Image (cartoon, rainbow, N blue to C red):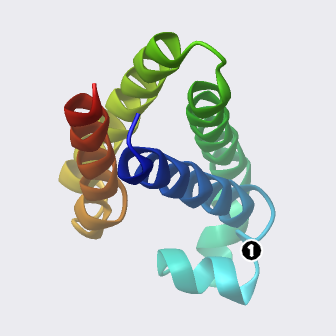
Amino acid sequence: MSYLASTLVALVALEHVYILVLEMFLWTTPTGRRAFGMKPEQAEATKVLAANQGLYNGFLAAGLTWGLLHPDLPTGSQIQLFFLGCVLVAGLYGGATASRKIFVIQALPAALALSAVLIAG
């Protein structure tokens, strides 16, 4: 697999670790509220839901990391494609239903990484 593809997949994985931290641990802090544009009352009322979302983002990051580290490169590429597809679908859905910025923050990086993995094939 190309260096570019691996780098893009790693960046998507790191982004999802960051989202996990924001949603699971920083949701009600000024940093978390600013990232998601929420008032303290909103953040407090939704913190359990956000923690659940954060856990899912952690699973996406874990899957991408698994694909990157898998000793059999073709199998690792297939794992990466699956998890990048999951990230892309989540980003498209989130962009259409929650906030248009999710298209750029989540869907676009996943699409670029997915394309790079396919090209590196």
Q: Nearer the viewer, residue 99 or 89?
A: 89
Residue 67: image location, x then y, percent:
57, 26
Q: Quadrant of residue 68?
A: top right
Which residue is farthest front? 2
Q: Nearer the viewer, residue 20 or 61?
A: 61
Q: Give the residue type at disc 1.
A: Thr
Judge left or right: residue 94 versus residue 72: left
Element class at badge 1: loop
Q: Give the residue drawn at x 67%, y 85%.
A: 31
Q: Give the residue drawn at x 26%, y 66%.
A: 104
Q: Bin the neighbour count of mark 1 within 10 Å (Cα to Cα): few under 14, some 14-19, many 20 and up.
A: many
Position of the C terminus by quadrant: top left
Image height of 111 relative to 28, above or below = above
Residue 49: image location, x then y, percent:
64, 46
Q: Which residue is mark 1?
A: 28
Judge left or right: residue 75 versus residue 69: left
Residue 103: image location, x then y, percent:
23, 59
Q: Give the residue drawn at x 68%, y 66%.
A: 22
Residue 119: image location, x then y, percent:
20, 34
Which residue is farthest right? 25
Image height of 104 relative to 82, above or below = below
Q: Nearer the viewer, residue 33 or 1?
A: 1
Position of the N terminus by quadrant: top left
Q: Quadrant of residue 60?
A: top right
The total of numbered circles placed on residues is 1
